[in-house]
Amino acid sequence: MREHTSTQIIAKEGWNYILFFVIVLLLSYFFDFAILFAVVVLLFTIYIFRNPERLPAEDDELAILAPCDGVIEKIEKAQFNAKDMIHIKIKKSLFDVSILRSPVLMNIHNTQKRHGLFLPLTSKLSKVLGERVQIEAKSFYSDIVLVINAGIFSRKIELFKTIGPLKSSQRFCILVEGSVDLYVALDSRIKVAIADRVRSGESVLGYFSHKGNLDG
């Protein structure tokens, strides 16, 4: 497995899709059929796989960054593995940047992938049958859990790393459409609200309250 995605302006994970639609466009032009539609689809595919550089809004090692572009859908106290944590859910649309970034400096110690169906996230079946990835990690300050859920327009969840260290804001995954659930320490200070729009690797969701140790 690759350690990281490319830093080109268009993520290399999208190159095959783009090449396919270039061929479709050439065929459309050759047969003089649905040329405008083929152009729109090609441009939209390029847009989906754009890979912009991102700089954190604050240079603070206590900052928790957004792992994906999208809208804050839920902030609540929740349990994970019988431990009380803060749960932040971000809904990512098809129009948001597909690159996911690490919310903090952390060390991944467990990754589980469930192959499943690509269903609307509003469907009750999505929770039990949908494609998802669960990442468990540790930072200096907190256990970190990321649950990545694929939506109906995703074809797969593509991870660049399943174990080992990630820098804060480092690219680690591609998700075309879906949601990301982030779990952090219960005493973290959350600075965002429901319906806020955030940007991966840039927007600050909150701050850890104290310094700890990086284990595992």
Image: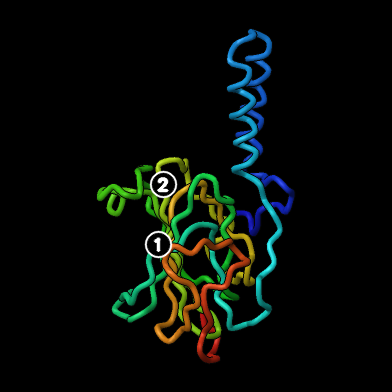
The quadrant the N terminus occupies is bottom right
- Crowd rating for badge 1 (residues with CA inside 10 Å; few <14, some 14–19, many 20+): some
Which residue reaches farthest top? 31
Residue type at numbered disc 1: Glu
The numbered disc on residue 73 is 1
User: x, y percentage for residue 90?
Assistant: 45, 61
Q: Are marks 1 and 2 in contact (CB under 8 Å)?
A: no
Count of marks, rendered view: 2
Which numbered marker is on residue 210?
none
Is 183 situated left or right of 26 in this image?
left
Q: Residues within 10 Å of mark 2 (few under 14, many from 20)?
A: many
Residue at the far right: name it.
8
Pick the residue in front: 211 or 94.
94
**How far across and down, in percent of the image, does residue 14 sit?**
62, 41
CA distance separating discs 1 and 2: 15 Å
Three-letter code, disc 2: Gly
Q: Secondary structure at mark 1?
A: strand
Task: Indicate left or right for 160 with 78 as reference.
Answer: right
Question: Residue 95's image quarter?
Answer: top right
Residue drawn at 66 percent across, 46 percent down: 50
Residue at 25% from the left image edge and 50% from the top image edge? 124
Question: Looking at the image, is mark 1 or mark 2 earlier in the sequence?
Answer: 1
- The image shows residue 145 at horizontal and vertical percentages of 44, 70
Q: Where is 75 relative to 161, above or below?
A: below
Residue matched to label 2: 151
| Residue at left offset 68%, top offset 10% | 30
